[in-house]
Image (cartoon, grey):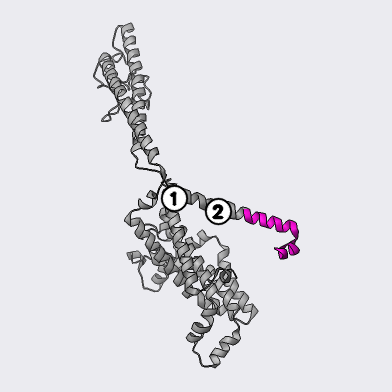
Amino acid sequence: MSNLTRTYGPFLTGLVLLLTGVWIVGLIILPQVNLIDRAFVYVPRGGEAQQAAVDFERAQQRIATIDFDIRATEKEIAQAAAGGGSASAGGAPSPSNPFAPGAKIGSSNIVRPGVPTPGLAAPSASPEQRLESLRVDRARLQGELGGLKERAERLKAEQQAATGHSLRNFTTMSGLHWRIFGMTLVYSFSVTVLCFLVCYPIAYAVAQTRSPERMALLMLGLVIPYAINELLRIFAWVMILANKGILNQTLASVGLLDLADGEAIHWVASNGAVFCVMIYAYILFMVFPIYNTIETLDRNQIEAARDLGASTWRIHWRVVLPHAKPGIAVGSIMTFMLSAGSISVPGLVGPGLHPDWFSQIIYRNYFEAGNWNIGSAQALLLLLACTVFILAVMSLFRVSIREIAR
């Protein structure tokens, strides 16, 4: 703190600390507290209360429609009595004669063939018969309305009574959900391992480069592709791996495939394609932590091990990897958490033909089903799994928080 004050002055130091505190509280602590609270609040969504409310509203709408038809029929009878004839015979528009002159197409009193209209009698019935039928239907619906209202209020009260803090958001997950949860952790771990196998040689090669110009070129080669938006990079891979994409067209150009006969290899919609794109998307999060730790390794130790007759494999196993443990731990943690929480890559690269990732289920509960409580419970499970992975990695590599932060 004193070093910050001496370097930046008390005003800037205080401003930085204030903004850091706002960031930690507003973007980390409060959202996590809200997520935990929602995860343990159960809101029943069986649909019976909602259906009862819909039935009650429909009954009210049918009564309003019948009232309109009753008034129209009474007016028709009055006009017939004043004119000394039948309104339907005279061609006036009525609920049972919607195609008479002056009838409006699309109005609520049109009788469509084969489609029963609530409260309307057969078109051949007289106005008096229709009026009597409408009144009978209205009385029947009015008698049912009280029971529908009572049932809707009772189910709503039961739903509110069942709402409260409990563990039911976690127990309502089906066996399929738990299987997808476990497979997502396995997939994320596989992506992490593959990403390490790809990134470790790259990080070692860059760290051992003696020429500054060559190191700059290697760094630019790693960084430049990431100047493009992540979604664009994912879509680029989709175009490469599509059935008529660049890869299949290349194989067809050398005679290995015949796209005209449908011999395309289905690269997309598979976990292999998802793994490939994820490794490309998160490669920097594994490369740079490993590179930063290997760069601090004294090259004389490698030379001494080589002079003593150690093989390349033994040099890496006994010298480089133990020194790079903090970087490997950081890279593994970041890659695993990004993979476990990824939505865009599984959704765009493998839609429909491979098992969903757990992050996609969480997304659907939040933004499609609108069930934030179940979504929060599932997100909390994923957060706990990632926390366990972090602790396991720290224990496996025997590194502390201070070493990781360094």
Is residue 33 rendered magenta in the image? no
Q: Which residue lies at the image location 50% right of the left edge and 49% below the top edge?
A: 34
SS for tag 1?
helix
Q: Residues within 10 Å of mark 1 (few under 14, many from 20)?
A: many
* Res 39 label: 1
Report the span colored magenta.
Answer: 1-21
Res 342 seen here? no
Q: Which residue lies at the image location 46% right of the left edge and 48% below the top edge?
A: 38
Tell me the kind of residue under disc 1. Answer: Ala
Looking at the picture, tell me which residue is in the foreground, 395 or 81. 395
Quarter of the image where the C terminus is located:
bottom right
In screen coordinates, is 117 left or right of 359? left
Tell me the kind of residue under disc 2. Answer: Ile
Q: Where does residue 315 sit, x and y in percent of width and height?
A: 51, 86
SS for tag 2?
helix
Q: Which residue is mark 2?
A: 29
